[in-house]
Structures are given as structure tokens and as C-alpha cells.
Amino acid sequence: MYRETGAGSLGPLATQDDATLLLLVQKGDEAAMALLYDRYSKVVYSVALRVLRDPASAEDVLQEIFMQIWRNPDGFTATRGSLGGWLSVVSRNRSIDMLRRKRPTEQVDDMQLASPYNLGDEAERNSMMEKARSVIFLLPTEQRKTLEMAFFDGLTHSEIAEMTGDPLGTVKTRIRSALSALRKAFKA
Amino acid sequence: MNTTQHFDQDDLALFAMQLLSTAEATAIVQHVEQCSDCRSELASVQGDLAAYAHTVDLHSPPAQARERLMKQVAREKKIVAISRTATSEEPVRTSTTTTLGIGSSYLDSYDEQERSFVSKFLPWAGWAVAAGLAVSAGVLYNQRSALRATAASNAGQLIRLTADAAAARQLLDTMNDTTAMRVTLQKPATAPVPQARATYIAEKGALIFIASNMEPLLPYKTYELWIIPADGHDPIPVGTFQPDAKGNASVIMPTLTKGIEAKAFGVTIEDAGGATTPTMPIIMAGT
């Protein structure tokens, strides 16, 4: 015997945090799923679009990721930290996989993620975006370009070294320095 | 695995971005499983990358993407089993009570040996029933999984077919639209090439020359036909001609000396009235 469950006793959905919404999704609550989509679809789609540069493919990635949440919400709860952060990184990884025409890499999707921000809160999310953008804008051009080539274009450090003519070590250092600058800014 | 030799942030960042070889990535996975320091650092790197991902210019997905997702969600509606509050002992107790309730009148008439037989094998019968139910449940679960997989596959196929049908409909609509602009494209036409045919009987001095597609000339110019004698003498003028508006022209039976064997014929452009020697170039020639 089966039954469907709803959000009835948990108050207005829009004010619920990610963990509560995931719990409701786990119980088959479609309204909670819609709310998670409304909360994070923009960033997931934008990251995919930046990597793939093709709206139809970006939409496929968006669909795939949110259906993964619907089918297996247990995989996101508690241990993963920020759902918004996790979704943005997974969107990038899935898009790179699509670019390379390879199957999704489970071992990297199955990750812990530490974020000092609550990306479920729109105001906090916007604040984090602004801060991250300003940090990246102030980076030396080489660092910014190198991180962009690695993250958004999916180029390996060897490929970047070959394209820019820089030594491998320099490429690695630039990536690390750029990420360190981000971390430092958020800790400040 | 040596957990004391940690991976640095460079490698963990490359790992997090899936930019390492399979062997390198595997080594990190194995190490991180056992090393809490590297696990913690990797989580921080993932957090850094998440922050970086949020620097992207934001674009809203198309409205139909939400609709598409929610339709798919509805298709894969979850069914959650009601959690029964009964303890595992209850069915046994109920079963026992029932058995005893029914059996008590019989038991009064049976001897102690039969009672012993019943009490010995009845519990096993319960286990056998439970095992049978477990097997049935397993079979049903597999059937349900297979049906769900088939349904998901069919749903995907339906989406593809719907998209194909929409594309086909759009194609037909475009072809049948009366307001559509219709243009036929072809290779640009080239100017027709001037051509002429000469029929000549040397011994009779008879010649018919008919030309077509001749370009118009300036008023003080004229075409002139020449016979190039086979004996090597100078070209002999046959006559002048002007093409009409359609580019057609002819020289019919001009006065010619009989018996001049022709090696070739040629046409030149001369001043009005003609010339006694051809002016180069020869614009048409034939042998």
C-alpha cells in the first residue's frame, strides 16, 4: 500500500531551507522540487551555458541535474554542505563531460563541499556573487585567464601550458593562487 | 596507502576540476578516503570552485525548461510506502492466538503426541509462509523496477518523437505559408557566345555565311569576313556585315573568284566600308 506525501505540516514552502525542501522531495513533494528549481536553476543553467555555449545543451544539463535531485535526494542531504554550491560545481562538471562526450564522473560528483555561505538565501547568494566577481576582477590577468581556461573550458594544465607557452608549474600555481585569493576574501 | 604524504592544493584543485589522468585521480581518491586533512582541504577547494562558478554571468533558462522538468517529475511520481507501526511480534502473537483459538476444541480431543507434533511443526510453517512472501515480494520488486525502467525509456522516446513531430510540423507550415517569400536562385547567366557557319563551294565561288549572337558594333565599325586561301596567299575579303538587334547577321552569295581553295575563314572588325587587309585580331575563325 502506498501514499503520496505533501508539505502540509511544514509551513510555507518558500521560506524553507534546502535541507527541508530536500526532505520533502524525498517524500515526493513536487512543489518543493519546483521551489528548488526556482532557487537554483539560473546558476545551474548559466554555468552550463558558459561551458557549452549552446542553450539547448545547457538546458539538457539543467534537466539532468534536477532530475538527479528528484530521483535521489538522499545523496544531497547533510554531508554535502551547500546545495547551491554543489549544484554549480556539478553543472560545470557535467557540462565538461558533455563537452568531452564522456560519461559523468561519479567520484568527483560525490564530493564534500565546504562553503561559508548559505546559498539558499537569495540575499546572501547575491552578496557572495558580487564579492566573488570583484575578487576575480582584481586578479592579475594571467591568473584570471588560467583559472577560466581550466574551470570553464575544461583544459588540463598541460593543455593550458601548451597554449600559453607557460611552464606546467606556473599554470598550477596560477590556478592555486586564484582560488586562494577567493578563499582569503571570503574568510576576511 | 601512505596517508602522511599529503596532496597539495594544486593537485586537489586539478582533481576537483576533473583535469587529472585516471591514475592520478584514483591515487587522490584512495588517499582522501583515509586522510581527513586532505578531505577537508578538498572540501574547501570545492567551496572555492563553487564561489568561482557563481561569478558567471547569469542567464535565465527558457520558461519551457521548467515545464519540461515538472512534467518529467510528474511522470516519475514517487510512491512512498506507509510505515507500519506494528511490531514484528504482533503477527506472530496474532497467529498464535488464532491458531490456539481455533485449535483448542480439537486439541481437547487429541492426545499429547499429536499436540507435540503440531507445536513442533506449526512455527516452521509460519517461517515457510514468510519465506514464500519474501520471494514473492522480491519478484514483484524486480517486476516493478523493470516496469519503471521501461516507462522512463518510453517517456524519453515520447519526448524525442514529440520534438520530431514539432519540427516536421514547422517544416510543413513553412512550406505551405502563402505569405512566405519564395525565390529561385541559379547561376548567373553568361552572355551567349558568337557563332557562325560558312558553307563554301570553291569551284563555284559560292558562299553562305550565317552568324548569330554577334555583339553590336560602334556606328563607324563593321564586321568583315575573310577567306584564308590554302595556297598561302593573303586573306581575301568576302564582304562586310552588321548584326541585327538580335545579334544575327549573314553574308549570302557574295561575288567571289571561282576556284580559290580555302584553308580557313575569319572575321575581323574593320572601319565602316571594310578593308582590303584584315585588322588584327581575328575575332572569329574556323577551318
Image: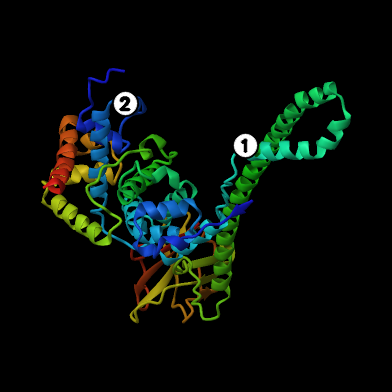
The type of residue carrying mark 2 is Glu
Can residue B219 be seen at all in this image of the molecule?
Answer: yes
The answer for which chain carries disc 2 is: B
Residue B104, image quadrant: top right
Query: Which residue is at the far right?
Result: B109
Q: Secondary structure at mark 1?
A: helix
Classed neighbour count for the residue bearing mark 2: other residues with Cα under 10 Å, few (<14), some (14–19), many (≥20): few
Classed neighbour count for the residue bearing mark 1: other residues with Cα under 10 Å, few (<14), some (14–19), many (≥20): few
Query: Mark 2 = which residue?
Result: B24
**Label 1 with label 2: CB-CB less than 8 Å:** no
Q: Secondary structure at mark 2?
A: helix
Tell me: B179 left or right of A50. right
**Is B118 or B159 nearer to us in this picture?**
B118
Residue B275, image quadrant: bottom left
Disc ID at residue A175: none
Task: Give the answer, above or below, for where B113 lies relative to A2.
Answer: above
Residue B108, image quadrant: top right
Disc ID at residue B89: 1
Residue sitting at x 23%, y 26%: B7
- Distance between the alpha carbons at the discs numbered 1 and 2: 53 Å
Q: Earlier in the sequence, mark 1 or mark 2?
A: 2
Q: Position of residue B67 (x, y in %)?
A: 48, 64
Task: Give the answer, above or below, for where A146 lies relative to B155.
Answer: above
Tell me: B117 left or right of B200. right
Query: Which residue is at the far top?
Result: B2
